[in-house]
Image (cartoon, rainbow, N blue to C red):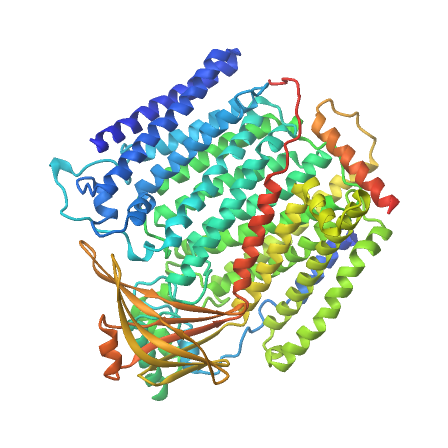
Amino acid sequence: MHRFKHPLSFWLLCGLAVCPIYAADQIIEDPVIELSESVYCPCGCVRETIRACVCGTAQGITLEFQTRLQNGETIAGIREEYLEKYGTQFNAVMLAQGFNVVAYIIPFFILIAGLGIVSVVIARLKRRVKGPAKAPSTEVDLSSKFNYQQVEDELERYKRD
Amino acid sequence: MASEIGQASIWLSAFSLLWAISMLAIGLRNRNINAIISGRNGVVATFGLISIAVSGLIYGFLTDDFSMRYVAEGSSYYQPVLYKIAALWGKMSGSLLFWLWLIALFGTIFVWQNRHAKDSLADYALIPVSVVMLFFTILVSGLISGVYNPLSRFPNGAAMPDGAGMNPLLQTPSMAFHPPILYVGFVSLTIPFAFAVGALMCGRIDNDWIVRSRRWTLFSWLALTVGITLGGNWAYRELGWGGYWAWDPVENASLMPWLLCTAYLHSVMIQEKRNMLKVWNIILMVLAFEFTILGTFITRSGVITSVHAFAEGDIGVYFLSFILLSLFIITGLIFSRWKKLRSLNWLESFLSKESVFVLNNWLLIALTLIVLWGTLWPIISEAVTGQKIAVPEEFFNKTVVIPGLMLLFLTGVGPIISWRKLTVSNLKRVFSKPIIFALVLLIPTIIYLFLSGNIVVGSRSVYTVLCVFFSVFVLVAIADEFYRGGKLRSKRHEISFLGGFFKLIGRNKRRYGGYIVHIGIVIVYIGIMGSKGYFLLESKSVTNGQSIEIGKYQLTLKKGFEESHPNFELSGAEFDVKRNGKYVKTMHPARGFYSQAGQGEQDTIESAITHFGLNDLYVALGPLPQNASDYVSRGEPVSVQVYHNPLISLVWVGVTIMFVGGGVAMFEKHYKYNVKLTDA
């Protein structure tokens, strides 16, 4: 609970909570577009969906998709057959299902855990101020004294303003 | 003969480097200046030797010496001179030689820069520089499997009648400059890395290494920024999918060191001003360097499929071993200096510039880890499930958007928040104006989103609103900093505001150069928001006289055309473009046909791009025969893809501003140093 007293952490956590990460990005109404955006082209280009690729293979596959959809086949069925034929590496949709859930969770874990670590580091660095003052190190070189002077000047200037 | 001399030079350079490392180690241990000078000369001699090898290879390209294996695989008689030279880094072993030459060049500049140094930090730093050079020398020497010596000939005096030629996709001006600039960025990071390791080795872990490597770090950062952007620009123009960034593994490999380098450039200020985060800065610099090697591992090892996999080979294990071994040694060095690395100061408040910089570092590291995670996910997934997968762009877009937006906000908070402690008066004075402006400008954004129907598409509108709010906040915050500072200077020196403004920048180039970079970043964000969030795509097959519509534009196929070039033939289609029914432009998308010995016939997409203000209309053609004019006039269908990319020009404009800002910051004068030799 102590960490939540830290206003910046609290604010950032609120930011995280507010952003609807899994919200749908766009409602795709055309089933051909939906299908052709969900699989990669097998022509030799790397990671271009059937919709984005301008090769002849993609053109042929789009026509095939159109015909099959008109014949009443479902998007899921056509996709499944496509991935069976060319391989799972041609799947352009990575749903948060099965083992892929791990892929989606980890980035947010990194963010949250990182925030936790940063909060602890900042809190520790701050807490030391309350402790007994330590003897100044002899290692402070001239540049840091110079920089320190700059900081002091800057603070003075702000006060005057 | 050039081949033999070049090969001998590479071999000699290995001995020269061994000599340099030994002499530097002996000299520094025994405080023997003659040995140290001999070590420095070893590095300079290596540069000379590697230059001979590189010249030999370029000579082979220019004279079409197809008895040299690397020349035969990467060039041809008909290749223009620019691409014959660019073929030097077009394939793996040549690119490694070029990398080695750059380290040798930077090592030599480093020796020259530090020739009058009163302490031994630079000489300690020269040891890691030499070790990295030695690693690359071994790679290109032909001793290890997976990479052949780029100067070697075919066995038994064989020679090909003509070379296979460079990959047609690479035969564009931006590809002639993008890889070397990116390499410059990667390789120049070796110097600040070497300073960090040198500081650990000699035990002088004050601010000295940071100040002395600052210009190098900024130089690397600038080169990486330009290199990454040129790569994006190449993808946009050449690959035909209307985008500039697809989270391809190799793009990611170049982005990760950039992110780490950016984090370092911020956190280093805390060490300089407050003597804090010493360990962290060393770790950041080491990571930035290691990620350049990791990037090479990803590019060259072939573990991950990429559009950039032009130069794969079986050398991943060497790169991985180098990364692990160097990390092991550096970790040991850090622990051995742990006491000296402790912070000398403490935070006074959570709400201070120091805390914001720490948060900024957290976000940049998080972004790096997320990108790394997504890049390596296909390997992890295949290992667990046995299924091959490709991580789509969507995954990255979804996972980086939140830290990206938070970072954007901090881009404005960082410059205006005070050091040590944010007081209530400081808060009111510097934060109120940007927040009010940002809130006011949100109203037209929301109205636009509502009127255009975009308000219903979920996360996109939320991100747009946040991006606009943060962008305006940052721009106003920084503009206010410039305004107040410029006004104060103009008053003090009794000069015009503009004079005061330039005086302000001149007095503190690092600080205000940094602010200019922040302005550039905001503009890039707006460009990304528009081009990635609101692009339109239409695909259609049209015959002569038929039209394709996209937004308020209408493109009508008029005729086909052909064009002859020295190394390729163009075959394309001419489209008249109307905006709101009024003719505005004719566009000429085409396919390029490269007929070169060894490669058969290859065609490339030659997109047509027209700028309408900040927006682009982008047209790419599907397959087309070489006689397009005849084909189109017969009424045959032409497959077309048209993209409307809003605000995309802001991406290039923003990066240019970043470059200018980085350049300004780079010319900050060094602080004068007169420290006593305190080496261990």
Place residue B320 in its image quadrant. top left
> Quarter holding the C terminus of chain B?
top right
Q: Residue B382: image x %, image y %?
A: 39, 56
The answer to whether one can see residue B417 in this image is: no
Q: How many marks?
A: 0
Residue B582: horizontal and vertical position, in percent? 48, 83
Q: Is residue B338 left or right of residue B647?
A: right
Where's the N terminus of chain B, which quadrant?
Answer: top left
Q: Position of residue A10 (x, y in %)?
A: 74, 57
Q: Is residue B617 above or below residue B472?
A: below
Q: Is residue B188 visible?
A: yes
Left or right for B651, reference A3: left
Q: Which picture quadrant has residue A78?
A: bottom left
Residue furthest right in the image: A160
For the point 34% across and 25% down, the residue is: B14
B165 over B16 or under it: above or below: below
Q: A101 or B595: which is nearer to us?
A: B595
**Image position of A131 (left or right of B48):** right
- Compare residues B286 and B243 and report the one nearer the observer: B243
Q: Residue furthest bottom?
A: A71
Q: Residue at x 29, y 27 (%)?
A: B9
Q: Position of residue B62 (x, y in %)?
A: 25, 42
Residue B215, image quadrant: top right
